[in-house]
Image (spheres, rainbow, N blue to C red):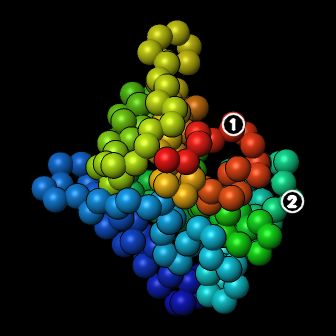
Amino acid sequence: MSPRGIARTVAAILVLLFALPLSGSAQPNTRTQVTGFGPYILGADATGDALTDLAPGRGEGSAGWTAKLRTDLYHKSGQFPIGGEMYSATLVVEVWQGKIASVIIRWSAGTFQSTDLWRVRTADLVAQIKATYPTLRVGNDVSITSGLDRGNRVFELFDADGNAVMVLAFRWLDLVYLWGPFYRASQWPAPPAPY
């Protein structure tokens, strides 16, 4: 990786660390709009420096939000924080109609040493999202509490423009930022109506 690529990765990690407050933070950095994180800003033109440190196409463990719409995927592997700890993950940026439409951080099933740690980090990530966006409207908040799927979770928040931030936990763990127009066009599932 080039020095510029390393600097961008470090910058993205720092943005994430400050955008999502660590558990127990005294004064969380609260937000009222879902925008993604720099340089991956939802709805921004996918030109210039935004994608220069990402590889085009599908990388290992990368998947976009929808197969319904024609999109371009970009990805890279890196270290991303949950609950004050850094874990290996894949960052995927999905471009639709020349705009950044989704930003997904996926921690694969093998990232965490145990299912119990995966459940703890899922809860940590949901708590971080709730603390960062305390006034946003909750979409789905579904947890499986028994059986083989125990620990699976879907948690969604929506801003007034229909942009979404989600935690999806199904043996892997995703932090998903979705641009409202892209989410509505994908129609899976239908997002709640704006305020």
Residue 147 x %, y %: 52, 9
Is residue 40 or residue 30 the one in the foreground? 30
Q: Residue reaching furthest left? A: 26
Q: Which residue is found at the position 57% from the left and 53% from the top?
A: 162
Q: Quadrant of residue 77?
A: bottom right
- Residue 60 appears in view: no
- The number of numbered discs placed on residues in the rendered structure image is 2
Q: Which residue is found at the position 49% from the left and 75% from the top?
A: 38
Secondary element at tag 1: loop
Labels 2 and 1 touching (C-beta < 8 A): no
Q: Nearer the viewer, mark 2 or mark 1?
A: 1
Q: Residue reaching furthest front? A: 195
The amino acid type found where label 1 is placed reads Pro
| Residue bearing mark 1 | 189
Residue 172 against residue 180 in the figure, above or below? above
Residue 76 against residue 186 in the figure, above or below? below
Q: Quadrant of residue 60?
A: bottom right
Residue 2 x %, y %: 58, 88
Mark 2 neighbour density, 10 Å: few (under 14) some (14–19) many (20 or more): few
Residue 151 against residue 48 in the figure, above or below? above
**Cα–Cα gap, marks 2 and 1:** 17 Å
Q: Which residue is found at the position 63% from the left and 41% from the top?
A: 191
| Residue bearing mark 2 | 70
Q: Image quadrant for the N terminus? A: bottom right
Residue 154 x %, y %: 52, 33
